Structure formats: structure tokens, C-alpha cells
Image (cartoon, grey):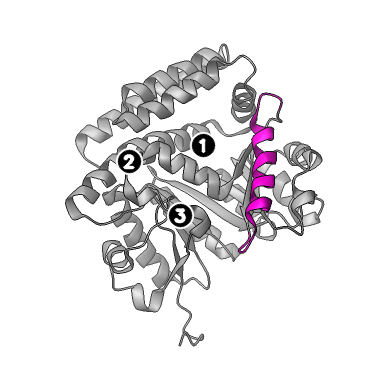
Amino acid sequence: MDLQHRLVRQAIDIAVGKALDDAKGNIKRSLRNLVDLGLLFSKNDAHRRLFLSARKAIANPKNTYIPIVKRIISEVDYDTFKKVGVNLGYNSWIYGVSKLIKKQQESGERLPWLLLFDLTESSPAFYDWLKRLFTESRGMGIFTFICRLHQQEDIVALCEMANCFDECVFIVKTPAALISEQTASIFGQTHNLIISVQAVDHHFSSASDINAFQLLKRNRCLYGYHLYYSEKNMNRVTSSDCVRTAIGFGNLFGVYIARDGVSKQCRDTVYDFIYRERDENGELLITLEWFRDIQYISDKITHGLDYMTVDLVKRAYFETRCRESLPHSLLEILYEMYLCTSSGLWIVLQSWNPDINYG
């Protein structure tokens, strides 16, 4: 990081810490102060509009965001809440996006603000390469990563890496079965993590779901769940009873992801449900329809950039096999692909297993 950014980040870190301490007395005033801080450091009109929208929401006496923040303050580790907030709100959405805009203007290439990695059959060599990729991403201005895990040992390796990239945000997507007392403790000690549990069912009634949520709550993690929906389970997942059950298990957010081929009518129905859950009469849970809401966020933080305008319904997942990609830098991979979505480019990087014939 350059010296100016380090100094600004340090000042913001101190200000956010003070606001969180003050929130115990007057949370609404503390949130207003944080929004004003965001406006002060905003880099463009898109950022200012984002914080002005937040100011308007806070001013609404019936908004549900203040009670939700109260929940987070009381249930999540202090250092985790502060670090995730600073890393996502400033490092990624303000400083990082500004760097990406400048780099895109210089290179004429499309660049993402968010990367997704699917970690399968990982190895030490793969994690060494992944570390180099994170280093390059951070240098470009990418500070947010989604990592989909499949094995318990990946949790240890990823958390060790996350600690090496303290100024980044790692959103971990994991099956409930991978969360044990040991892995939940590791999650709890890694403060730049958000954990999203892939629930076994929408009732959250399986033993693995219940165990995962209880362990994450005990370790004061910032966690929620994600569900995949289609016409077959649409009516079941859009149930307020399910949301209340999730809250009872300590979930702070719920993400709903459309399966491939889902109709627009189904997507609209699920989004209407999510929107109702977010209004002034909703529950104390942040609900998101992944593709629509990530499009909305992307538009807010990068307004005016062409690479953020593609309809997410027409999104694509881009697979690059690590056996072929290990020698290449991130920029080489991105430029070769030259593809994007409105949320930025999602690269699904699968680790190379020498026992598999990739063709």
C-alpha cells in the first residue's frame, strides 16, 4: 500500500473504532458519524450517492438497519465487525475501486472488483500460487474475494492466508458439514472473514446445520446462510418462518441464489419476498438476492463504468484450470478472457489434481 492510503486507513480505523464504542450509548448517532466519514473520503459521485442513500435510510425512524447493527454489535467479535467494515467499505469500495478505475482507463481492459474462487482438490503448490494471485489482486485494487470450500483442511490454509492479507475481505462459502469445533475456532480468530453456510435445507433442521450455526455463534463469527432456489422450492424458501428460524440460530444474513435456468417470474417472486424482509416491517436479518443485489451494489460503487452494465441474468462463470494457469499472472488471465459481468469478473479457479484427466 502507498503511504497516503496507509495513513487514511489508519485514521478511518480509529474513527470506526470510536464510533463502535460510542454505539453502546447512541447507535443512531454513531451510524450517522460513520456515513459522514464515508462521505468525507468518497472518491466520486457514485460513492457520494451511496452514502447519501445510507444517510436517508438511517434517518427513517422505522428502518430495520439500526436494530440489525445492534444485533451485530452484540453477537459478533468486535475486531471482526470493525475489520470487515473497514476493509469492505473503504479498502474495497472506495480505495480499491478508485485504483481499478484508473488502471482500467490506462489499459483499456475490463477489470473486476470481486473475484470468486472454487477451491477443489487443493495442494500446497496451489496455495502458493493463490497467494501470489491475491498479492497481485491487491496491488490492482481488488480487496474482496469469495472462496468456496470443499474440504476441512482448506479452512486452515485459507485462514492462514487471510491473516497474511489483513486489509482484504474473504467471504467463505462452506457446507455446514465442514464446520467443527476446531474450524469454527479458527474462523473466530480470523477477523477479516464473513462465513456463509450452505444450508442442507430451508428449515435449518438438519443436525449439521444446527451444529454449524451453534459453533459459529459460540465463536462470535460474522455468519449467515445461502440457499439455492428454483421453481421447485420457491414457495418453501420464501417463508418468514424460515427467516425467523435462521435468526434464532444467530444468522445475520441470508443469501438466495437462483439456479441455472430459473424463470424471470420465479426470480421476481423471490426478490419480492427478500425486498419485503428488508423493509421497515421486516425481520432482523439482512436478506439478499445474490445476482440482483450484487448488480445494485456494483452499480452504486462503480457508476458509469461500462464493464458493470451487463445483465446478471446473462452471467457466465469462467473456469480456468490451474494446471494451465499457474504460470500466468492475474492480469494475463483477465486479458486473455476479456469477459466480465456487472459484478465484476468471477473466476472459478479449480486446483489441479494430477489424478484427474482434464482433457
Residue 75 in the image, given as x and y percentages of width and height:
64, 31
**Relative to residue 253, is residue 55 drawn left or right?**
left
Q: Which residues, given as a range, are shown in magenta? A: 259-281
Q: Nearer the viewer, residue 51 or 213?
A: 51
Q: Main secondary structure of the magenta part?
A: helix
Looking at the rendering, in which quadrant would you find the C terminus? bottom left
Contact between marks 3 and 2 (CB within 8 A): the answer is no
Q: Residue at x 54, y 50 (%)?
A: 291
Residue at the left extreme? Answer: 106
* Residue corresponding to mark 2: 304
**Relative to residue 189, is residue 178 drawn left or right?**
right
Q: Nearer the viewer, residue 43 or 234?
A: 234
* Residue corresponding to mark 1: 80
Helix or strand or loop: what does disc 3 sit on?
Answer: helix
Given the image, on which type of amino acid does mark 2 rest?
A: Gly
Question: Which numbered disc flags the more N-terminal residue, 1 or 2?
Answer: 1
Question: What whole-number distance in Å separates the C-alpha atoms at marks 3 and 1?
Answer: 15 Å
Please check the rendered image and state whether residue 262 is part of the magenta-colored stretch, yes or no: yes
* Residue corresponding to mark 3: 160
Residue at the front extreme? Answer: 265
Q: Residue at x 65, y 17 (%)?
A: 62
Q: Residue at x 63, y 27 (%)?
A: 68
Helix or strand or loop: what does disc 2 sit on?
Answer: loop
Given the image, on which type of amino acid does mark 1 rest?
A: Thr
Mark 3 or 2, which is nearer the eye?
2
Residue 107 in the image, given as x and y percentages of width and height:
19, 55
Q: Residue at x 50, y 19 (%)?
A: 56
- Within 10 Å of disc 1 (Cα), the crowding (few <14, some 14-19, many 20+) is many
Given the image, on which type of amino acid does mark 3 rest?
A: Glu
Q: Quadrant of residue 40?
A: top left
Q: Nearer the viewer, residue 54 or 92?
A: 54
Mark 1 or 2, which is nearer the eye?
2
